[in-house]
């Protein structure tokens, strides 16, 4: 390492924690994906993975403090996992079991763990942004120094909820950081396509200017770079100066989501859109070379923070932990039919 400040002021324990969480998230997502082939029919409905975004997730959360709050979109497994949520309860939730984080009522796209500040997620694009803005307003009223981190994808920047929320957050100087994880694709449409489906603006962080707030773009494959930008944004929000838009550029390594197949055909994950839709295997292979997990592993090993043997131990522990989560989920019961209307208020 030639940069003396490459650790961004983080000690070795914290750096190893970051690598551990990234590894755990990747292994969890791999296990979810493998469930479709190893245990057909166990996962029902849509599931979206965040492999490729681990550095962005962990780098952002490292900048927060106990008591802060978080909302995310439907590609949401990594956030509660890094915040300390039990992966067994998460896997059971994705499997629709009674032992799940939300007793099987939420599934993959609707995880919540309020005890850890993870208020929840939504399957509706951009819906969490006004909710997070409301949470930030409540935090401002409480006056306890809380900050809200709101995570969403690049596609959400085309929704009215995005513009309305950033506008009011800026006007009222709310303690919120908007983290846009730009994964290069709006489902199967590339973000740089010059047509009606593309999200205008390059980089997308320029949208912040319309709302008189800072906008920054960061390499979302580098957890330390993400941490540095989000740390500054969190400090600004906590000081009462208002929100920031952070565009974290990542590359989603799996397809947008699983395919809902006709009756009798198991649900499955297709190939990545770069390959299946655009026939561009070269783009996809190049993206995999920038995989943030082995990339950060190399950074820590080269920097003398972690030995290669210890890094392998982290990976092995994650595999064991997530296999236990799968086993727990599979062995857990489905909720009985008579509970279908529990917690329905209207």
Image (cartoon, rainbow, N blue to C red):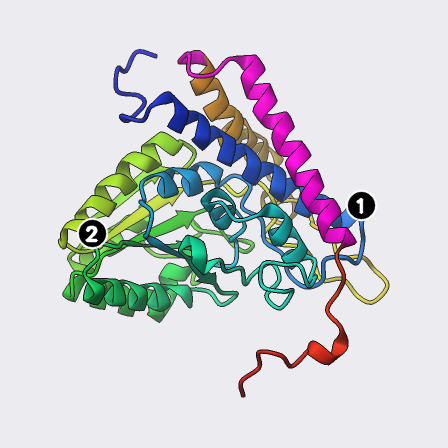
Q: Residues within 10 Å of mark 2 (few under 14, many from 20)?
A: many
Instruction: Report the side of 5 relative to 331 (left or right).
Output: left
User: At which x and y percent is residue 93?
Assistant: 64, 58
Q: Of 289 and 174, which appears nearest the observer?
A: 174
Magenta stretch, main secondary structure class:
helix
The residue at the point 47 percent across, 15 percent down is 301
- Residue 9 visible at all: yes
Name the one closer to the observer, 292 or 9: 9
Q: Could you give the CA–CA distance between mark 2 and mark 1, rounded to whole angstroms?
A: 45 Å
Front in this rendered view, residue 82 or 173? 82
Write down the quadrant of residue 9 in the picture: top left
Mark 2 sits on what residue? 237
Question: Disc 1 designates what residue?
Answer: 38
- Quarter of the rendering containing residue 30: top right
Q: Which residues are magenta?
A: 302-331
Dot 1 falls on a residue whose secondary structure is: helix
Q: Residue at x 56, y 61 (%)?
A: 109
Q: Secondary structure at mark 2?
A: helix
Tell me where residue 133 appears, x and y as whole percent. Answer: 30, 65
């Amino acid at each position: 390492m030639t940069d003396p400040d490459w650790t961004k002021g983080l000690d070795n324990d914290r750096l190893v924690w970051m690598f551990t969480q990234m590894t755990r998230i990747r292994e969890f997502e791999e296990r979810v994906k493998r469930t479709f082939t190893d245990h057909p029919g166990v996962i029902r409905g849509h599931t979206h993975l965040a492999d490729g975004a681990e550095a962005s997730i962990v780098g952002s959360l490292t900048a927060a403090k106990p008591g802060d709050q978080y909302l995310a979109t439907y590609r949401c497994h990594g956030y509660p996992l890094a915040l300390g949520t039990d992966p067994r309860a998460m896997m059971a939730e994705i499997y629709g079991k009674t032992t799940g984080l939300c007793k099987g009522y939420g599934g993959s796209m609707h995880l919540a763990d309020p005890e850890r500040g993870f208020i929840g997620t939504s399957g509706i694009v951009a819906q969490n942004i006004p909710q997070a803005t409301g949470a930030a307003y409540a935090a401002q009223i409480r006056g306890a120094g809380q900050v809200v981190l709101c995570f969403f994808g690049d596609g959400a920047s085309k929704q009215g909820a995005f513009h309305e929320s950033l506008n009011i957050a800026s006007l009222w100087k709310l303690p919120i950081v908007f983290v846009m994880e730009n994964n290069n694709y709006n489902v199967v449409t590339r973000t740089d396509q010059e047509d009606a489906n593309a999200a205008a603006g390059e980089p997308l962080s320029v949208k912040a200017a319309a709302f008189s707030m800072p906008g920054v773009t960061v390499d979302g494959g580098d957890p330390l770079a993400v941490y540095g930008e989000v740390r500054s944004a969190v400090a600004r929000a906590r000081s009462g100066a208002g929100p920031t838009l952070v565009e974290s550029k990542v590359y989603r390594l799996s397809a947008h989501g699983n395919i809902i197949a006709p009756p009798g055909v198991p649900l499955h994950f297709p190939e990545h859109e770069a390959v299946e839709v655009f026939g561009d295997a070269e783009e996809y292979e190049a993206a995999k070379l920038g995989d943030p997990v082995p990339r950060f592993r190399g950074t820590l090993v080269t920097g003398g923070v972690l030995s290669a043997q210890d890094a392998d131990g982290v990976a092995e522990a994650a595999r064991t932990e997530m296999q236990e989560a799968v086993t727990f989920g599979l062995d857990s019961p489905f909720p009985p039919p008579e509970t279908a209307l529990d917690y329905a208020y209207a």
